[in-house]
Amino acid sequence: MDRSVTSNLTGSIARRWDGSPAAPGELPVEVEVRWSALGATVLVAAPYFGDVAPVGPAGQTWQLWEHEVVEVFLLGPDERYTEIELGPHGHWLVLELHGVRRVTSRVGGLTAHCQLAGDRWSGSIDVPWSALPDPIEAWNAYAIHGAAGGRHHRALFAVPGAQADFHRLGCFQRLAGPVLASQVRSGQACPIDSGD
């Protein structure tokens, strides 16, 4: 993914959730968040592990985190954040939260575009500003795959602890400056991600 576009967030999820090395031979998951006047587009390019797809057609899917999935979290002030999940079969879930794990809204009416190609998959989903915190001050991204009891959890920025917990907001990577919807809509430059 293009790292030269300073207004976007980009990262390579290459380590386990606690910061330790991923399993030998596990390729990284690439994530990107692109800002536009309409909101954010989340893009994923990932290895495909062949996990069983969720039951039901592609689209909004509750408990998608129990399947092969990539998740992007965008954090604003006062513990307001949006969790964006995308799976290789076109399933997705977007949640607005206020406080750790306190879901205030399931965002509907979105469309994910996903493509499987051998042992790789790619996908994208557009999320409107109305479903995002404003401003956005920090972020993290995760990848999950594997059957129950043998799940693999990876994080862009480590969330250390006794077990994988992707809602450790204090472990999110702060941005060089906040991303404001009004700033993006007016065409002003956004801060570059402070690094992964």
Image: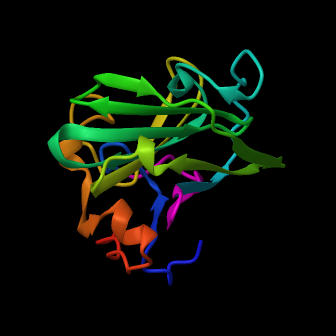
Query: Position of 190 compared to 106: left or right?
Result: left
Query: Is residue 18 visible to us here?
Result: yes
Specify whether residue 188 is painted magenta: no
* Residue 49 vs residue 66, the one in the foreground: 66
Query: Position of 137 compared to 16: left or right?
Result: left
Residue 39 drawn at (x, y percent): 50, 56
Residue 47 drawn at (x, y percent): 67, 50
Residue at 63% over, 38% down: 110
Residue at 29% over, 49% down: 158
Residue 13 vs 7, above or below: the answer is above
Query: Is residue 196 visible to us here?
Result: no
Which stretch appears magenta? 21-39
* Residue 50 vs residue 178, the one in the foreground: 178
Residue at 59% over, 29% down: 146
Quadrant housing residue 189: bottom left
Residue 9 drawn at (x, y percent): 43, 66
Specify whether residue 24 is painted magenta: yes
Residue 184 vs 56, above or below: the answer is below
Q: Quadrant location of the C terminus?
A: bottom left
Residue at 29% over, 25% down: 101
Quadrant housing residue 64: top right
Q: Quadrant location of the N terminus?
A: bottom right
Residue 96 drawn at (x, y percent): 38, 33
